[in-house]
Amino acid sequence: MLDQVEVARILDILGNRNRRRIIALLRQKPCFVTEISERLMLSPKAVIEHLQIMEREEILSYRMDERRRKYYFLANDIDVIVRLLRREQMIIEERDDSNRMRSSLLQLRKMVETREEIAENLKNIERDIDRHIRELVQTGRKVLDNDTQVDILISLAHCDLTREELCELVEVPPDAVSDNLEILKRKNIIEQAGETYRLRDNHAQY
């Protein structure tokens, strides 16, 4: 049985819609960071932050595969039951329920149609992203030194990241990440702003 403090922390975690989406995804199967990012259309940096919060609360854990990628899974699932207890009878004004129901049904119809249109657009975007990443991997292997550099650049194409966040994403030892970041900086492909790395403008625009 959880105490009140633990319950409050769990409710804070579930109060974030994207964390609930990550939990729902991991109920289906274990996933690694980039897979969660692509499936839920979230930046890798945001995914890492959500995973770290839930890992601290022992909701999630991970295992590593032969490529040292972290596969996250639910260590403990969450089942929340909420009951609203009324201490006094509330006075409710009579309304025209029939008209309200018609209005709600029409609104629901519009929302469903909008959702289907957005879902179709997202499907097309995800297909284009997958194709673009495959092309980048093929091109990168021709012009770069190794797959780690390719993974770093694809990660930075999603958003600006720190060295630690890149280590989490590309899942290679920190020294290897640091070495390859320096090489990419010397090639003028990326630049560093404080602790954050990003694509240089002349590469980011393509």
Image (cartoon, grey):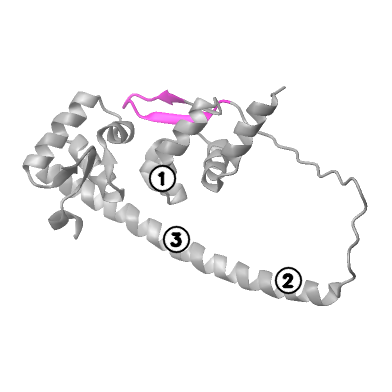
Q: Earlier in the sequence, mark 3 or mark 2?
A: 2
Q: Earlier in the sequence, mark 3 or mark 1?
A: 1
Q: Nearer the viewer, residue 186 or 68?
A: 186
Asked if the residues shown at circle 3 and circle 2 are in contact, with their CB atoms under 8 angstroms apart, the answer is no
Mark 1 residue crowding within 10 angstroms, few (<14) / some (14–19) / many (20+): some
At numbered mark 1, what does the secondary structure look like: helix, strand or loop? helix
Residue at (50% x, 62% y) in the render: 119
Mark 2 residue crowding within 10 angstroms, few (<14) / some (14–19) / many (20+): few
Please name the amino acid that badge 1 sits on.
Answer: Ser
Mark 2, residue position: 104
Residue at the left extreme?
Answer: 186
Quarter holding the N terminus is top right
Q: Let me know if residue 68 is in the magenta part.
A: yes
Alpha carbons under labels 3 and 2: distance apart: 26 Å
Quarter holding the C terminus is bottom left
Residue at (89% x, 68% y) in the render: 93
Find residue 145 and report its horizontal and vertical position in percent. 11, 37
Rendered view: 63 above or below 155? above
Please name the amino acid that badge 3 sits on.
Answer: Leu
Q: Magenta stretch: give its range.
A: 62-75
Mark 1, residue position: 37
Q: Earlier in the sequence, mark 2 or mark 1?
A: 1
Alpha carbons under labels 3 and 1: distance apart: 14 Å
**Disc number placed over residue 122 in the picture, else none:** 3
Alpha carbons under labels 2 and 1: distance apart: 34 Å
